[in-house]
Image (cartoon, rainbow, N blue to C red):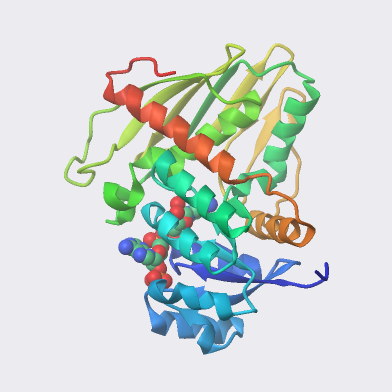
Amino acid sequence: KDPMKKLGVALVGLGMYSTGQLGPALKQTKHCRLSAVVTGSPEKGRQWARDYGFPESSVYGYDTMGRLADNKDVDIVYVVTPPALHARDCIAAAKAGKHVLCEKPMEVSTAQCDVIINACKAAGVKLSIGYRLHFDPFHEELRKLVRSQEFGPFMTMTGGFAFSMQKAQWRAEKALAGGGPLMDLGIYVVQEACMAAGATPVAATATVHPKKRPEFFKDVEESISWTLEFPNGAKCESFTSYDAGRNDFRAEAKGGWFELKPAFNYGGIAGATSRGPLVIAGVNQQALQMDDFALCVLNGQESRVGGAMGRRDMAIVEAIYASAAGGGKRVE
Ligand code: NDP
């Protein structure tokens, strides 16, 4: 394939993240362009076609995604629907022969992650998860410290990501979200802990906190604390909630420390190490993430944030929920 060619991307689900971040980011990418959308609202789709300059014939519904197979202008399908719909939409994309970018959390169970992985394998298409922080330079500093082991291994970690949810939405419905803030926000802290430890945890212990608004969070947790243990004995104390404000990560080693606060934003991340403040220019995380996947497709390489990583994180989430359900017992 021509390495200078811009790959066509179809966004599936034109909600907050597509509208506020991914659409605008696609205008900043070097190797991608928005060439189609999949939406339950044809009217919204036609507006996107006008705004982004693609034909109205490239507006699809969830039930007509099979027709993407005939659209040569689409190389990558980016699934941005609620988590419990990711498998349905990723399968449709893979069956249409398109490479798949799937938002986090990958799905709502490891079994459903396997369904996505297998569908992509069977169709011979690439799969990547929307883990944008792997393309952020502040988080790259952490990965550099892990690679160089300059401070030694990070043994003591803390992290929290939480916000106060006010409006009713799928995030508070188990059927669509798979769980509460752990699925949606806590997964970032899980990701970061694995990044800092440079490993996959061996055990989880967790406690769900009493609900302040049980009528709002009927079948999902409102707040949860958990600890991950890594093979070398490192631990990460973590917290997430839909009734609080947290956005931080800290990792301590014998030879130094690393901290980000805010840690998980699209932009405006700030932080320091024991050597001093991190002075780094901001980037468009989503543009870099999509360009990286486009290059993987063009060069025949696997994404560094592939299906196996999405599945790993779901296995950790399942262990955290199992521990909480078991009254805080240690789950290996
Ligand atoms: P929104 O609720 O704002 O949008 C979801 C969209 O999915 C809807 O607008 C709708 O699009 C489509 N949809 C299809 N079926 C349903 C349904 N049954 N209920 C609700 N929506 C449906 O959610 P977000 O955009 O915030 O989140 C979407 C995905 O992106 C999630 O997986 C989320 O975790 C992820 N996300 C990732 C972020 C990141 O930083 N990586 C940040 C924010 C979200 P339409 O009307 O076009 O059919």
Residue at far front of view: 122
Q: Is residue 103 visible?
A: no
Residue 108 in which image quadrant:
top left
Please provide percent x and percent y for residue 321. 35, 30
Q: Out of 14 and 79, give the one closest to the viewer.
A: 79
Q: Residue at x 42, y 77 (%)?
A: 64
Q: Using the rendered view, name the quadrant where residue 22 is placed.
A: bottom right
Q: Quadrant of residue 101?
A: bottom right
Residue sitting at x 32%, y 18%: 328
Compared to residue 141, the image places residue 37 above or below, namely: below
Q: Quadrant of ligand 1?
A: bottom left
| Picture residue at 27% right of the left edge, 40% below the top | 220
Query: Residue at the location (80% across, 25% down)?
Result: 148
The answer to whether one can see residue 190 in this image is yes
Q: Quadrant of the C terminus?
A: top left
Q: Position of residue 217 (x, y in %)?
A: 23, 43
Instruction: Check the picture and name the quadrant holding the N terminus.
Output: bottom right
Q: How many marks?
A: 0
Pick the front one: 1 or 35:
1
Report the front residue among 116 and 158: 116
Residue 133 drawn at (x, y percent) = 62, 45
In the rendered view, tell whether residue 40 sits above or below residue 171. Answer: below
